[in-house]
Image (tube, rainbow, N blue to C red):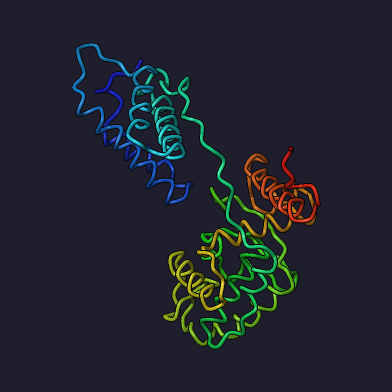
Amino acid sequence: MITLLDAVDSTSIADFIASLSGSSIHTQKAYRRDLLQFLGYLKVRPPAPGFVLDNHFVRGYIARLHRGGRAGRSIARALSALRAYFDFLCLRGRADSNPTHDVRAPKVARRLPAVLDVDQTIQLLARVPENELETRDLAIWELAYSCGLRVSEVVGLDLDAIDLVGGEARIFGKGRKQRLVPIGAMANTALRTWLRARSKLVDGDEQALFVNRLGHRLSPRQVQLRLKAWGVKQGLQQNLYPHMLRHSFASHLLESSGDLRAVQELLGHSSIRTTQVYTHLDFQHLAKVYDAAHPRARRKPE
């Protein structure tokens, strides 16, 4: 059992977050918020003598989050943060056991990722750049869609990670896990054009592949804003965001090849279960085709 005074405090939370240096900054921030909220909950409930943290207490906390209207996905993340935190305390010798191991979060409805269909993707990319920044943007969209990259992977690319002669890119994904992905012909052409324009923006030894107008590495937020504005110019109605290009890559590739393992490798997923969400998208597409084409698809029984 874990006593409150010996285990859960702001210092150990800070130590735990520091141990997550290989995780994304978004995960670290989310886990910190979740754990500090849990700590705050403990502080407003002064423990009685001999109080211990057990799975009954954790279940009560999870139930409280649920009653408070917190979304199932958010509750699942909070429980994940607690589970990892208590594992950390156990490894450091500050806890005897993890009180979350027998606690389950509410079931979360599967949320299918939003994607562009092939025609919409062509519409997005069918723009002739008018300046250096648009040349850069087109290269980003082409590369992200060609390789199925996360926005963090795109902005993290250095010049030496791209081999245009060999047609491949060396990508560092979550946890700095490395993978090699092929670069399609259209992305290759767009990158070559961008590299010629890039020299007009960079004076020093900046190694970032994609830079802003000042010659510094581009930020994920800048990519997000540029894509949204680009989509409006191209007449697309969707609220575009960078990860949609990754989803579209996976959906289109799986629809054409049916090779789930290959898609998993290209996306850099550690588990095939993560990739399987795209099989649901593929079935959704087939169901729409069936409903639109089959003469008896929508007929209700009399």
Query: Disc count in the image?
Result: 0
Quadrant placement of the N terminus: top left
In this rendering, position of residue 168 left or right of residue 218: right
Q: Is residue 50 above or below residue 294?
A: above
Looking at the image, which residue sits at the far top? 50
The residue at 57%/40% (across/down) is 110
User: Closest to the observer: 243 or 292?
Assistant: 292
The residue at 26%/30% (across/down) is 41
Looking at the image, which residue sits at the far front? 302
Q: Is residue 225 above or below residue 247?
A: below
Across and down, in percent, residue 121 comes to 65, 68
In this rendering, position of residue 203 left or right of residue 252: left
Across and down, in percent, residue 238 comes to 54, 65
Task: Answer with the quarter of the image where residue 51 lies.
Answer: top left
In this rendering, position of residue 195 left or right of residue 57: right
The residue at 51%/74% (across/down) is 232
Task: Answer with the quarter of the image where residue 280 lies.
Answer: top right
Task: Answer with the quarter of the image where residue 103 lies.
Answer: top left
Q: Is residue 239 above or below residue 229?
A: above
Quadrant placement of the C terminus: top right
In this rendering, position of residue 68 left or right of residue 76: left
Across and down, in percent, residue 164 comes to 70, 73
User: Closest to the observer: 233 or 58?
Assistant: 233
Across and down, in percent, residue 98 comes to 42, 22
The residue at 51%/70% (across/down) is 227
User: Closest to the observer: 83 or 87?
Assistant: 83
